[in-house]
Image (tube, rainbow, N blue to C red):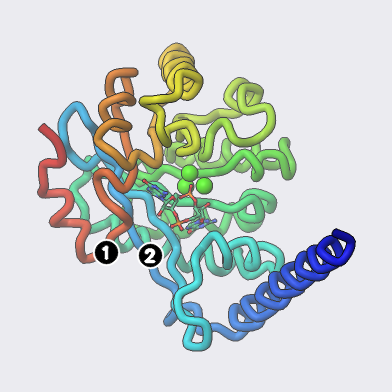
């Protein structure tokens, strides 16, 4: 038993060492990456289930490194935040996303993810606002997604950054709602326009009374507070059926579509997605 335990400890340390070196490898590749060349965006449709139409698209970062191949944003975004490269990445991605969104009909919106670091600096925010104003998309068609961890970072600064975005005319969503701390206090104290209900509340919702109750309560609360909602991570017929029955109108997830390329967005808009 003792030997096993020791082996377990060694394994654990080895795993930590592997993670650390992988992080360093990603960091080095990112530091020398030709971002203009290697970064791209995928777009995932957000469907209005009342009309069966695309309401908007969420832009999702993609990185193909010559050395590492495809690296997921879940892996490289945190590394970029640590190294500070996120500021440049966000600006480049926003320009790309705006150029694609400019080709869409005026009633289709763009949802764009900001990181905590983007929100943490007023100068950085001013530069992002300038990009929006220079772009061909009316700010009222842009929705910025922020996570609860971003809010935790520096509440007052985040609030003033959100106010800057609202002042411009853009919407602001709280992403991954329910997974962070003090979610309710955030919707009470920040000038948000939309809540994205995290997919952890949606998987197997049809068989989980507690998930169903949470989603129903959040939808009711948002309705009362005049906030739009998007239900994320809907994968199956049953999940869609259940969240629709609970009153959800805007839905995103593999059930409708995985993220698609920029070229595929216009055909997706032309399609009827339900009924
Ligand atoms: P997120 O903002 O919560 O984005 C949704 C993620 O869920 C995406 O993963 C999407 O592909 C995935 N997804 C969508 N529908 C389903 C579904 O039905 N089932 C499951 N299992 N997954 C689904 P992705 O593209 O790998 O992005 C992961 C995270 O990386 C994002 O989570 C976001 O936090 C971050 N991220 C992505 N792009 C950007 C970006 O441009 N800027 C920043 N700051 N963060 C980004
Ligand atoms: Ca998001
Ligand atoms: Ca999310
Ligand atoms: Ca997430």
From what the image shows, is residue 35 above or below residue 214? below
Q: Is residue 59 left or right of residue 153?
A: left
Q: Quadrant of residue 249?
A: top left
Label whose residue precedes the other's in the sequence (1 or 2): 2
From the image, which quarter does the N terminus lie in?
bottom right
Dot 1 corresponds to which residue? Answer: 262
Q: Is mark 2 within 8 Å of ligand 1?
A: yes
Helix or strand or loop: what does disc 1 sit on? helix
How many numbered marks appear? 2
- Between 87 and 264, the one nearer to me in the picture: 264
Farthest-out residue, right: 2
At a point 50% along the width and 20% down the height, the residue shown is 210
Q: Is residue 13 left or right of residue 142?
A: right
From the image, which quarter does the C terminus lie in?
top left
Q: CA distance from mark 1 to mark 2?
A: 7 Å
Q: Is residue 231 left or right of residue 49?
A: right
Helix or strand or loop: what does disc 2 sit on? strand
Dot 2 corresponds to which residue? Answer: 41
């Amino acid at each position: 038993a003792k030997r096993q335990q020791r082996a377990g400890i060694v394994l654990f340390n080895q795993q930590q060492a592997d993670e650390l070196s992988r992080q360093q490898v990603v960091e080095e590749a990112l530091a020398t990456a030709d971002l203009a060349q290697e970064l791209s965006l995928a777009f995932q449709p957000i469907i209005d289930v009342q009309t069966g139409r695309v309401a908007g698209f969420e832009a999702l970062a993609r990185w193909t490194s010559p050395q590492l191949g495809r690296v997921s944003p879940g892996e490289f975004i945190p590394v970029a935040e640590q190294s500070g490269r996120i500021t440049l990445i966000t600006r480049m991605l926003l320009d790309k996303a705006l150029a694609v969104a400019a080709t869409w009909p005026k009633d289709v919106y763009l949802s764009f993810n900001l990181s905590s670091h983007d929100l943490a600096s007023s100068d950085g925010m001013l530069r992002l606002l300038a990009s929006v104003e220079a772009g061909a998309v009316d700010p009222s068609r842009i929705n910025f997604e922020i996570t609860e961890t971003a809010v935790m970072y520096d509440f007052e600064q985040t609030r003033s950054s959100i106010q800057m975005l609202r002042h411009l005319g853009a919407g602001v969503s709280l992403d991954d709602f329910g997974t962070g701390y003090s979610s309710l206090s955030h919707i009470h104290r920040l000038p948000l326009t939309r809540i994205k209900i995290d997919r952890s509340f949606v998987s197997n919702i049809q068989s989980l009374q507690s998930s169903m109750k949470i989603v129903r309560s959040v939808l009711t609360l948002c309705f009362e507070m005049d906030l739009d909602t998007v239900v994320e991570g809907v994968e199956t017929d049953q999940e869609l059926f259940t969240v629709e029955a609970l009153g959800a109108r805007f839905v995103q997830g593999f059930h409708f579509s995985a993220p698609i390329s920029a070229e595929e967005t216009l055909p997706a808009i032309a399609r009827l997605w339900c009924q």
